[in-house]
Amino acid sequence: MDLEALKRGWRQETLDRECADVREEEIMQVIDSRAKEVRRRVRRRLRRETRYYLGGLFIALASFAVEPSLVKALYAFGVILLFGVLIGTLRYAEARVVDAPVDGSLRVTLLGLSARVEWTRRAYLAAYMVFVASAVAVLVVLAYGQWGEGWLLAAGLALGAGALAWSYSSGRRYVGRIFGRYDAELASCLEELDRA
């Protein structure tokens, strides 16, 4: 083998190595930008969900303000508390997603963001169920006060249990639709990182 062939082979190997390094760096940058985009979209979605509940809170408070009384004030306090749990959960989840650490490796960042999105999904569903269960409990107490014991109260309890089961099922589907696409995108980023 002549010296010129050795030099060409060495240059080609060096060029191939450099191209592979550049491709890997580009892939990492693309994955990183996708992860940042997911974080931004999750934050935007959580803010949108918060606005829905703020609107509901203002509507409920406006309806209580029409004819103020002690009973309505107590109900207003309960409504504020329940909406506050939902809104507080969403705001805290937003802060957790936004403040997810990005100083580790890309893999650690993606896994951390994925875990925070999963936590957000579970926390949102839990807060939603507290809201619904409390509303059902208030309705059952009102039914008891109106009709006393008997078959109407039993029917109200059965309807309340059915409403809770339906709310849990529909709530799981709802948060699955909301956050499932983000989970899938983060999983896709992790798969691309594994291939890189």
Image (cartoon, grey):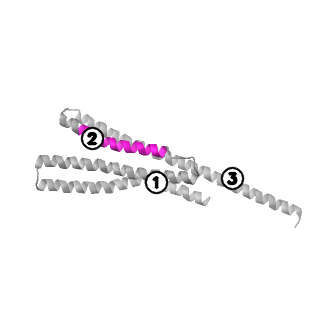
Which contiguous range is marked in magenta?
75-98
**Which residue corresponds to mark 3?**
22
Asked if the magenta segment contains residue 82, the reply would be yes
Q: Quadrant of the N terminus?
A: bottom right
Q: Residues within 10 Å of mark 1 (few under 14, many from 20)?
A: few
Where is 85 relative to 62, above or below?
below
Tell me the quarter of the picture where residue 152 sits.
bottom left
Q: Mark 1 and mark 3 in contact (Cβ < 8 Å)?
A: no
Rendered image: mark on residue 153: none
Whole-Å distance between the Cαs marked 3 and 1?
30 Å
* Amino acid carrying mark 3 in the image: Val
Q: Secondary structure at mark 2?
A: helix
Q: Mark 1 and mark 2 in contact (Cβ < 8 Å)?
A: no
Whole-Å distance between the Cαs marked 2 and 1?
32 Å
Regarding residue 178, the answer to whether it shows in the image is no
Where is 16 relative to 127, above or below?
below
Q: Secondary structure at mark 1?
A: helix
Give x and y (percent) for residue 144: 14, 49
Give x and y (percent) for residue 194: 59, 60
Q: Residue at x 65, y 55 (%)?
A: 24
Q: Is residue 125 left or right of residue 72?
A: right
Sequence-wise, the earlier of marks 2 and 1 is 2
Q: Is residue 122 left or right of residue 158?
A: right
Q: Residue at x 39, y 44 (%)?
A: 90
Where is 10 relative to 148, above or below?
below
**Which residue corresponds to mark 1?**
181
Whole-Å distance between the Cαs marked 2 and 3?
56 Å
Rendered image: mark on residue 79: 2
Tell me the quarter of the picture where residue 3 sits.
bottom right
**2 or 1: mark nearer the eye:** 2
